[in-house]
Amino acid sequence: TTAYVPYKVKDMSLAEWGRKEIRLAEAEMPGLMALREEYGASQPLKGARVAGCLHMTIQTAVLIETLIALGADVTWSSCNIFSTQDHAAAAIAATGVAVYAWKGMTEEEFNWCIEQTLFFGEKREPLNMILDDGGDLTNMVLNQFPELAAGIKGLSEETTTGVLRLLDRVKAGTLPMPAFNINDSVTKSKFDNKYGCKESAVDAIRRATDVMMAGKIAVVAGYGDVGKGTAASLRGAGARVIVTEIDPICALQAAMDGYAVKKMENAIKEADIVVTATGNCDIITEKSFRALKDKAIVCNIGHFDDEIDMAWLNKNYGSTKDTIKPQVDLYTIDGKEIIVLAEGRLVNLGCATGHPSFVMSNSFTNQVLAQLELWQHADQYENQVYTLPKHLDEKVARLHLAKIGVELEELNPHQAKYIGVDVEGPFKSDLYRY
Ligand code: NAI
């Protein structure tokens, strides 16, 4: 273990500004605030040492302070080198939380930050819970510090890509603790991935480039939850959107939502803006780069930076790279200038501030409920990947209705019997897809 560093952020003078924005975000995060109300007095997370690795934003600050309000000790790092909001990190550090995060760190610093979160306080007590986004913290613990696994009750994983890594581990028999898949709560993937990206995708491209969206041709690779939100975002801004897909069901959905659906090799030639949203590798490769128009904008909204072949780009055209401003780079390929955002990393957190608070409150309420369940009842679970039961998913949604003035009908007993559910829910079978 390395020497104890209590926290590391960019600039503590930003703490006051961060605190003001956290206060505003709390008003938009009714799910998290309701959990503080419900569980604050009983301190159910007392004794939990939660190491978190998730974009250190204002919204995440409200998550961290909710875990603390429920009794947990918390350490934190960001799961992306560009996603930290330095004022949020400073505000959290100012309260004495061990946070290691700043915007624009190197890969080495990224790993250093995660490593700092494994041991708590001057006593260097090891973590006993993991809260992850993308699996980098989980992988560090299980691959580099396997001796810590026995003391960890469980982990909760935020995103599609991290869940894929966990399922690989289950298959390989290398998951040594129970895990909750937060992503596949309906109130996560069908809201954060979709409505979140609907707001943050265009926000990022605008903040980065100020380009006129209306009339432009935008190509969105992947029409899963993130792709659906991203395509809607661009269409909402007036762009003409083309979708690419490998899955016939999602391709048909895109077509019936009114988008052109093409192969990338055909779509790319016309594209003014390309956004990858597949969670897969090698979507924009040498061939695509060479086919792009002059001044085309290329970015990725999936979790990792291998959707766009940045390795090829930097190896062959790195010498032409001209930084317009942080996270906005111009490359010259075959005489054409190509604009690449956030170095191919997730653009909404690199070039903007991620999703708005209200939608993140849904995701993070699921996170807190999973942490509570694992901390209190880990012994009732196998070393598998679980989703929260539907009644909790419905609870998360319910906690967000009043804020936006939603009125909900209530079933009478006759109606409930007629459709075969309880008056109190759950209202759908586990097979229902929303
Ligand atoms: P998903 O599985 O719902 O959607 C991915 C889609 O891409 C699927 O429909 C799949 O068929 C398609 N696809 C795969 N390979 C393809 C290829 N070669 N060409 C065209 N389409 C292809 O996954 P989801 O939830 O949409 O997540 C996508 C990525 O975004 C993941 O890495 C996830 O972790 C990340 N994510 C990012 C967020 C952000 O705020 N930036 C928020 C939530 C998730």
Image: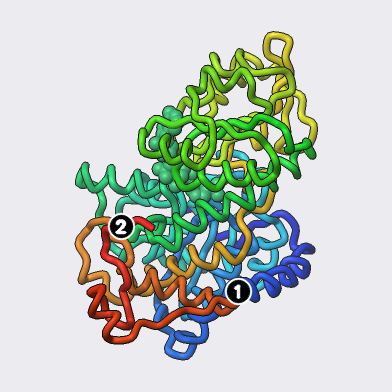
Where does ligand 1 appear, by image quarter? top left
Q: Residues within 10 Å of mark 1 (few under 14, many from 20)?
A: few
How far across and how far down the image is residue 95, in percent?
A: 64, 73
**Do labels 1 and 2 touch, CB within 8 Å?**
no
**How far apart are the alpha carbons under marks 1 and 2?**
42 Å
Please state which of residues 406 and 293 is positioned toward the viewer in this rendering: 406
Quadrant of the rendered image containing residue 81: top right
**Ligand 1 under 8 Å from disc 1 Cβ:** no
| Numbered label attached to residue 326 | none
**Ligand 1 under 8 Å from disc 2 Cβ:** no
**Which residue: 44% across, 31% down?**
245
How far across and how far down the image is residue 351, in percent?
A: 69, 44
Work out whether mark 1 precedes mark 2 in sequence or the reverse, and give the earlier one: 2
**Image-based side of 56 in relation to 16, left or right:** left
**Which residue: 61% across, 39% down?**
106
Does the rendering let one see residue 29? yes
How far across and how far down the image is residue 8, in percent?
A: 64, 57
Q: Amino acid at mark 2?
A: Ala
Q: Amino acid at mark 1?
A: Ile
* Residue 383 position (above or below residue 361): above
Total tally of numbered discs in the picture: 2
| Numbered label attached to residue 149 | 2
Q: Which residue is mark 1?
A: 404
Disc 1 is placed on an element classified as helix
**Which residue: 59% across, 70% down?**
62
**Image-based side of 237 in relation to 163, left or right:** right
Quadrant of the rendered image containing residue 60: bottom right
